[in-house]
Image: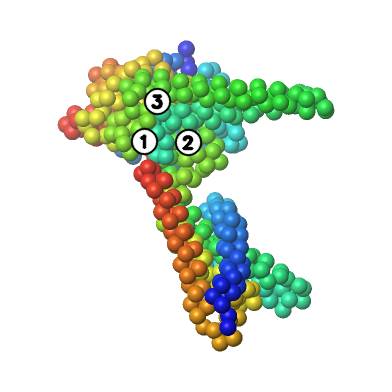
Amino acid sequence: MTSFAEVTLKLLEGFGTTCYIFILTLVLALPLGLIVAFGSMSRFKPLRYVVRTIVWIIRGTPLMLQLIVIFYGPGLLFGVTGFDRVPSVIVAFVINYACYFSEIYRGGIENIPRGQYEAGLVLGMTKVQIFFRITLLQVVKRILAPMSNEVITLVKDTSLARIISVVEIIKSAEAFMRQGLIWPLFYTGVFYLLFIGILTLLFRYAEKKTAYLKV
Amino acid sequence: MEYLRVEGFRKKFHQTEVLKGVGFTLQKGEILVIIGASGSGKTTLLRCLNFLETPDEGKVYLNGELFSDAAVRYSDRELRKKRLRFGLVFQNFNLFPNYDAKRNVSLACELLARERARAKKRELLAAEKGIARLKAYRRISAEAAAMKREGIAESHARADALLAQVGLQEKRDAFPYELSGGQQQRVAIARALALDPEVLCFDEPTSALDPELTGEVLKVIRGLKGRTMIVVTHEMAFAREVADRVIFMADGVIEEDGTSEEVFGAPKSEKLKAFLKRTEEHGWI
Ligand SMILES: Nc1ncnc2c1ncn2[C@@H]1O[C@H](COP(=O)(O)OP(=O)(O)O)[C@@H](O)[C@H]1O
Ligand SMILES: [Mg+2]
């Protein structure tokens, strides 16, 4: 008989991988998304069109498909060894989420009245100074709500990693199913709920902290 | 002495020519008031002067020297330096909503102070060679840090003084959304003064305000007499009172110009006569 403690330990192991994918994706996709956003708003037309087309493709196809392409693609298409399993997951997730984030950033940035930007220019500020000193915090406040949705989706999307045999928490639970044990699978839900509960609290805290910004 | 000379400004948006060769001169310390119906190109003229638009043609001379030429493409760096010599107060204030009144005023100064300290540090370090540079590093860093602190303290003191000048000392901690339109515009004026521009421009500074709030803003502008200023306004009584020179713009050209007495007292062109008559009837346009 497999004990509750044993299952918990095993699931925690998988949950570690889940967290790893989540955190690394977030840390890399947040800045990359900003770069993609600037690309999609560039005044240089070819760059803008290329970036927007990439964003369209990434947002228009399932993440699962992208994951498969990145993991199996290099070997099938070019006969070279591609990334390992976990790095494949990270690459696919980072690209996918950077594109989603970029659209959120773009919406946030484009909604900042142009007058503030011009006021900064007239005061001799550089574009970079204006962005970091004036625009960014307002953008952060505006995008907090859509960001929290995406981030919560990301937590659950990590379970897609199991289709290329990465042992995250769902995959760990599936191992018990093969022994005829179904409850560990439902038990994983508790992990997700706790994790997302904490994230929700964090976002609520951030919203409170930026409430003074009436923008 | 002729202080500012604008020569042959032309500007097209798509196919429409908005400025069709606008030029004028201004003495140091004079106030130039620009009047004219909406759409006549007044805003575009001020935006060209402040490098927010690039004119298609035209030159500006400042203090006897060629200051800008539409035929020259300036680098971002050069543009920045040039922008510092002009100031612009916008019709709808454009305060930074994420900062309180004081920071709105001090921010640009503070950033410049930081940059100057950084540049100084680079310069001092570059003067030292080899191992001496390593030895001097701490001393130079400390020197630059002190310079930065001093610069920032100065910006803050200046912001306090300017807020006092526009009568908003007690509102220094207020965010823009906590201020009335008139107060916001006064903060914006203090902000424009922070860098002590040589020519300060106002684009209809009171037209976004409720009538009862225009007085406080006009009073602040009146108090700046002695600065070289260009004021676009529909407040005819105010214009008449403060203007040393007046330009009447119509359809992208200067239809008439002269002293306040000449333009308001003895208008020559039919367009100006009609314009003044209309403003008299409506109070403003
Ligand atoms: N960025 C722009 N693009 C296209 N047309 C513009 C732009 N800015 C101003 N215009 C046009 O130029 C004309 C003059 O505008 P403006 O300088 O704002 O006049 P005023 O300030 O005297 O009302 C208007 O017809 C306006 O529609
Ligand atoms: Mg205008």
Q: Nearer the viewer, residue B196 or B22?
A: B196
Q: Label 3 sits on what residue type?
A: Ala
Give how far apart the Cα atoms at labels 1 and 3 are: 15 Å
Left or right, A183 with reference to A65: left
Left or right, A144 with reference to A214: right
Give how far apart the Cα atoms at labels 2 and 1 are: 17 Å
**What residue sits 56% from the left and 41% below the top?**
A128
Q: Residues within 10 Å of mark 3 (few under 14, many from 20)?
A: many
Residues tagged by mark 3 and mark 2 found on one chain of the structure? no
Give how far apart the Cα atoms at labels 3 and 2 are: 14 Å
**What residue sits 66% from the left and 24% below the top?**
B142
Callout 2–callout 1 Cβ contact below 8 Å? no
Residues tagged by mark 1 and mark 3 found on one chain of the structure? yes
Label 3 marks a residue whose chain is: B
Q: Which residue lies under the disc numbered 2?
A: A120
Left or right, B50 with reference to A50: left
- Element assignment for label 2: helix
Query: Residue A114's image quarter?
Result: top left
Q: Nearer the viewer, residue A127 or A74?
A: A74
**What residue sits 67% from the left and 26% below the top?**
B141
Query: Residue A68's image quarter?
Result: bottom right
- Element assignment for label 1: loop
Residue B20 position within the rendered picture, expressed as x and y whole percent measured from the top left: 43, 36
Mark 2: C-beta under 8 Å from nearest atom of ligand 1: no
Q: Which residue lies under the disc numbered 1?
A: B175
* Mark linked to residue B190: 3
**What residue sits 49% from the left and 36% below the top?**
A121
Q: Label 1 sits on what residue type?
A: Phe
Residues tagged by mark 2 and mark 1 found on one chain of the structure? no
